[in-house]
Amino acid sequence: MGAEPPALLVLAGSAEARAVLEALGGEAAAGRLRIVASLAGATRAPRALPVETRVGGFGGADGLAAFLEERRIGAVLDATHPFAARISANAAAACAAQGVARAQLRRPGWEGPARRFPDLASALAAAPAGARVLAATGRGSAPLLAGRGDLSILVRVAEAGDEIAGVETLVARPPHDAEAERALMRGRGITHLLARDSGGIDGAKFAVARELGVEILLAERPPAQPGPVLPDVQAALGWVRETLGLGG
Ligand SMILES: NC(=O)c1ccc[n+]([C@@H]2O[C@H](COP(=O)([O-])OP(=O)(O)OC[C@H]3O[C@@H](n4cnc5c(N)ncnc54)[C@H](OP(=O)(O)O)[C@@H]3O)[C@@H](O)[C@H]2O)c1
């Protein structure tokens, strides 16, 4: 019996995680790599990932550390959303405890002009009464948005069923291209764009807002964990191959 191939845990939940998993499918199929993907279970109908996938929390950093040991994981790629700060902190702690290599795949944010705030609440507070706000902030922002009855808010959510009571809701799964963003912002007479600095495929809205003179109220992302931060899928693939000794 040959030696067991090295094992990679990919903390998923982002488009980049899916792209990494798809790119590594060949290595897994050839038996050179074991891959486990992990989803939080937040999306009701996630598209299947092309590798073994477990769903649900690990039970904090200790639970994740136990999982790493039990599954003999050699490296963890944290490819979660830039605002998913808790799982990233847990991954850092668990990997440190187990001596497992870890890197964070973190797509760059919006580097253009915007009014920047430490969180969504302060960004929303900066919108003047009567503003027509496109809130690209998802269902998690419901309690916040419901508190600003003096604004005309259109909130965008990714899944049907996430509509927010008392706030006009648009259900549209990303990506949203520039043409669609332009039509939406123009058509609705949007004056302010409220968003988190998530980066990635949804960046078109910022360029369109600039073009149309829509003010951007941006909640900044939480800081990255210490250690390697990889900006894109190519860099993540390079890190995985080098860390697990997979070669070219
Ligand atoms: N935050 C966002 O805006 C956003 C947007 C798009 C996608 N997502 C994805 O949705 C998931 C949850 O986001 P969140 O902001 O709720 O995260 P979070 O606040 O960082 O994590 C909350 C808890 O959910 C569990 N968890 C999170 N991601 C997990 C994963 N990939 N696999 C297994 N358990 C996970 C962990 O539970 P235990 O402590 O029990 O292990 C974690 O402590 C993330 O995977 C993220 O990539 C988030």
Image: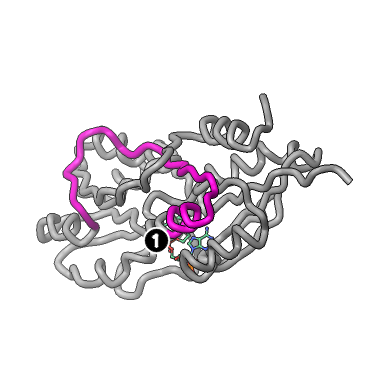
Residue 242 rendering spot, x and y as whole percentages: 59, 31
Residue at 23% across, 56% down? 119
Q: Secondary structure at mark 1?
A: helix
Drawn side of residue 172 relative to residue 141, left or right: right
Q: Residue furthest left?
A: 128
Residue type pointed to by label 1: Arg
Q: Which residue is tagged 1?
A: 86
Q: In the rendered structure, does residue 116 fall within the stretch colored magenta? A: yes
Could you tell me residue 233's position as x and y percent?
Answer: 53, 35
Question: Image point 51% across, 31% down: which residue?
Answer: 235
**Rendered location of residue 75, percent (x, y):** 58, 46
Whether residue 189 is visible, yes or no, is no
Viewed as shown, does residue 50 lie left or right of 212?
A: right
Q: Which of 246 and 198 lies nearest the eye of the viewer?
A: 246
Q: Magenta stretch?
A: 90-119
- Whether residue 240 is in magenta: the answer is no
Residue 180 screen position, x and y as percent: 42, 42
